[in-house]
């Protein structure tokens, strides 16, 4: 099954990405909650921040790493859902968040 990824990812101004020592976190400035990123999630976040488009991020990550597209697509979709639930990104169908 092909996981569909949203084209546009909106990172709101209240989502602050920081790297502290060897950790990467996103701070939600509205509620002061931290969201920790593992190394894979960090790379996905950096690509999303650069491209603003999950398909372009997927393509860039596939060129950089040896991973099955279906696995990476699933990982990106899971991270996007978690970030959206935390209010750290907005997806086209979740603009009310």
Image (cartoon, rainbow, N blue to C red):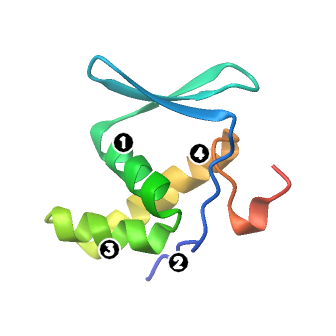
Circle nearer the N terminus (4, 2) = 2
Marked residue nearer the N-terminal end (2 or 1): 2
**Residue 89 seen in the current view:** yes
* Residue on which disc 4 sits: 83
Instruction: Report the Cα–Cα distance between label 3 and label 4.
Output: 20 Å
Q: Residue at x 50, y 62 (%)?
A: 77
Residue at 36% in and 42% down: 42
For disc 1, the marked residue is 42
Q: Position of residue 78 (x, y in %)?
A: 50, 55
Distance in Å between CA atoms under marks 2 and 3: 14 Å
State the residue at coordinates (40%, 58%). Answer: 75
Few, some or many residues within 10 Å of mark 4 (<14, 14–19, 20+): some
Q: Would you say the residues marked 4 and 2 are in contact, meaning their CB atoms lie under 8 Å apart?
A: no
Judge by depth and name the residue closer to the eye, 38 or 70: 38
> What numbered label is drawn on residue 59?
3
Q: Mark 1 or mark 4: which comes first in sequence?
A: 1
- In front: mark 2 or mark 3? 3
Residue under pointer 2: 4
């Amino acid at each position: 099954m092909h996981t569909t990824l949203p084209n546009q990812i909106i990172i709101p101004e209240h989502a602050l990405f920081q790297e502290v020592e060897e950790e990467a976190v996103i701070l939600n400035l509205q509620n002061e909650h931290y969201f920790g990123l593992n190394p894979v999630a960090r790379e996905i976040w950096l690509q999303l921040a650069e491209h603003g488009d999950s398909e372009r991020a997927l393509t860039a990550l596939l060129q950089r790493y040896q991973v099955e597209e279906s696995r990476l697509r699933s990982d990106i979709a899971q991270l996007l859902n978690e970030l959206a639930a935390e209010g750290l990104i907005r997806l086209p169908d979740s603009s009310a968040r």
